[in-house]
Image: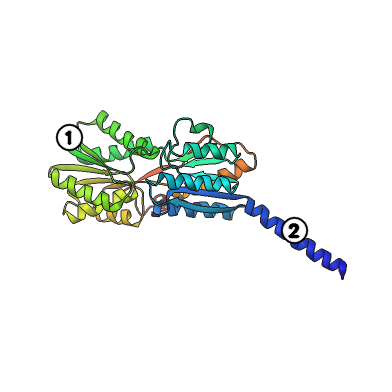
Amino acid sequence: MNKMLKVVVATAMAAVAMAASAADKEIAVIVKTANSDFWQNVKKGANAAVGELKGYSSSFQGAASDTDLAGQVALVENAVNRKVAAIVLAPSDPDALVPAMKKAWEARIPVIVIDSAAGKGAENYHQSYLATDNKKAGELCAKALIDKIGTTGKIAIMSYTAGSGSEVERVGGFRKYIEANSKLQIVGTFYSNSQMGTALNQTTDVLAANPDLKGLFGANEPTAIGMGRALVQSGKAGKVTAIGFDGNADLQGFVKDGTIEAIAVQSAYQMGFLGVKTAAELIAGQKVPKFRDTGVLMVTKKNIDSTEAKNVLY
C-alpha cells in the first residue's frame, strides 16, 4: 500500500512539475490594441501555433488604443517581471518601446517584433522581425490608384498613427511612388489614430473641402472603414476612387459593392502564427532569420473570391 501511495505521489508531483514547466514557457503576444479584427486575427494565428507546440502556452494583450504608449510599455514590463519565455511584440511607437525591449533583453527573454519596426538601437534587443514589406505595400496602393485615376488631379491620404513604424513605411512608400510617377496633388495627410469615427469625420471634411477630389488612400483597417463609410454617406461612393488597407468583413463589403476599388491585405494570421513559432525556435536555441516578409495581396472585386484572397481575408 505504501509503495502504491509513493507511486501516486510521485506521479502527482511529476504532473505538477510538467504543468509548472509548461507555465514557465509562456509566450506573451503584445499588440497595439486588441480592439480590431486585424489584431484578433493575429491572436488566431498565435493560438494555432501554440496548439502545434508541446510545453507552451500563450497570452494575448493589447493597449487601450494605438496611442496608449504607456499602457503598452507596462504590458511589456509586466511580461518581463513575470519571467515569460518570450515576447511577440507589435510596437505602437518605434522609440517608446525600446527601453522595455532592453529590459527583456537584459532578462534574457527573446523578443520577436511583428507588424511595425522598432526604432534605432532596438535591433540589439530583438532577434527577429516579421512584417509586411510596408514600403512595397504602400507603393502597390499608389500604383493601383494611378492605374484607376491617371496621373493628374487631387488625392488625400487618410493615415492612422503618426510616427508608428508601419505608418512611416507604408504612407512613405505610397507618397514617394505618387510623387515619382505622377503629377497628382496630395491635399493633405490626416491622422485618425486608428479611430474609425475620426477617419469618417476627417474623410467627410476632405470630400466637402475638395469637391473635385479624385482619390483617397485609407492606410489601415479602422481608417479605411471610416473612409468607406464617409464615401457612402456623402454619396461619393464609386465616384471618388478609394484604395484601402487590411481585409475585414466591412472592407470586403466595400470592395464588393464598389465603394473601395482595392484593398492591400496583410497576413495578420501569419504574423501571429510565425511570431509564436519563431519564439519557440529561439527558446530551443535555433537560428532564425532577422526578417521574415509575411506578404501582402491586392484584393479587388475580380479576385476577392479566389483561394489566394480567402487565405488572407478575415
Work out whether mark 2 precedes mark 1 in sequence or the reverse, and give the earlier one: 2
Residue 70 coordinates in the image, percent (x, y): 43, 45
Q: Please name whichever residue, 256 or 76, is drawn nearer the observer in this view of the structure.
A: 76
Q: Is residue 148 above or below residue 3?
A: above
Q: Quadrant of the C terminus?
A: bottom left
Residue 56 coordinates in the image, percent (x, y): 61, 52
Residue 15 coordinates in the image, percent (x, y): 72, 60
Type of amino acid under label 2: Ala
Type of amino acid under label 1: Thr
Residue 54, numbered circle: none
Q: Is residue 33 above or below residue 121?
A: below
Tell me the residue that label 1 is attached to. Answer: 152
Mark 2 crowd level (few <14, some 14–19, many ≥20, 10 Å Cα)? few
Q: Please name whichever residue, 35 or 146, is drawn nearer the observer in this view of the structure.
A: 35
The picture quadrant where one finds residue 282 is top right
* Kind of element beneath mark 1: loop
Q: Left or right of 239: which side holds 134? A: right
Residue 78 coordinates in the image, percent (x, y): 53, 48
Q: Quadrant of the N terminus?
A: bottom right
Coloration of the structure image:
rainbow
Label 2 – label 1 distance at C-alpha: 71 Å
Of tags 2 and 1, the one toward the viewer is 2
Kindly identify the residue that appears in the image at 34 percent across and 49 percent down.
221
Residue 251 can be seen, yes or no: yes
Q: Is residue 17 above or below residue 142?
A: below
Kindly identify the residue that appears in the image at 32 percent across and 34 percent down.
172
Tell me the residue that label 2 is attached to. Answer: 14
Q: Please name whichever residue, 240 or 85, is drawn nearer the observer in this view of the structure.
A: 85
Q: Left or right of 137: which side holds 13? A: right
State the residue lying farthest toward the bottom: 1
* Kind of element beneath mark 2: helix
Kindly identify the residue that appears in the image at 24 percent across and 46 percent down.
242
